[in-house]
Image: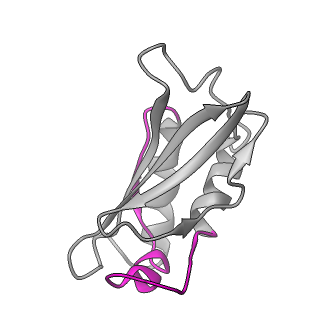
Amino acid sequence: MINYNFRPETYFDGTGSSILLTKLHYPESQWGEEISIYINVIDGKYHYEAIDFYGNDINLSPSKTNDILSLQELIRMIETMEVNAENILGNIELTISGIPEAKSDLYPELEKYFIEKRKSFGLN
């Protein structure tokens, strides 16, 4: 059973000011696109940024928090990503409407959640 209330004790291990929160791979997209979500701390708040190959402006909700996200909050952030309709490159709108494969060192059960969700939609 997935613990949706799980929160890592910390995001940072002292190796830098920016850390990879999760890498999302969309195998059904034409080029197997990926989106990476990073965390930075600015003025004591966690700031989240999503980056894809094309440099699209991907909006995350929330974009910043005072506290570490629970697994449930991270899943909601991923599943509600949106793009700024101006200057869209590639097929990012179609890509983020899919169900990703997810990897995260901080949230080990994130991968399991998306594997189960993909299976429920008939995806491998």
Q: Main secondary structure of the magenta part?
A: loop
Judge whether 11 appears above or below 103 on screen: above
The magenta stretch is 80-106
Foreground of the two, 26 or 117: 26
Q: Position of residue 34 (x, y in %)?
A: 32, 62
Q: How are the colours assigned in the image?
A: one colour
Quadrant of the snapshot with the C terminus: bottom left
Closer to the camera in the image, 115 or 41: 41
Q: Residue furthest right?
A: 66
The answer to which of 120 and 19 lies nearer the viewer is 19
**How many marks can you see?**
0
Can residue 122 be seen from the camera position used here? Answer: yes
Q: Is residue 56 left or right of residue 61?
A: left
The x and y percentages for residue 79 are 60, 67
Residue in view at x 49 percent, y 73 percent: 120
Residue depicted at x 47% and y 32% = 18
Q: Residue furthest top?
A: 14
Residue 2 visible here: no
User: Position of 73 compared to 40: left or right?
Assistant: right
- In the figure, 119 relative to 102: above or below? below
Assess whether residue 94 is covered by the magenta stretch: yes
Residue that lies at the very extreme toward the left in this rendered image: 31
Q: Residue at x 49, y 57 (%)?
A: 50
- Asked whether 46 or 71 is in front, the reply is 46
In the image, is residue 102 part of the stretch drawn in magenta?
yes
Which x, y percent locates residue 83? 54, 76
Image height check: is 5 above or below 83?
Answer: above
What percent of the width, then of the height, locates residue 77?
64, 59
Q: Residue at x 20, y 76 (%)?
A: 31
Quadrant of the drawing holding the N terminus:
top right
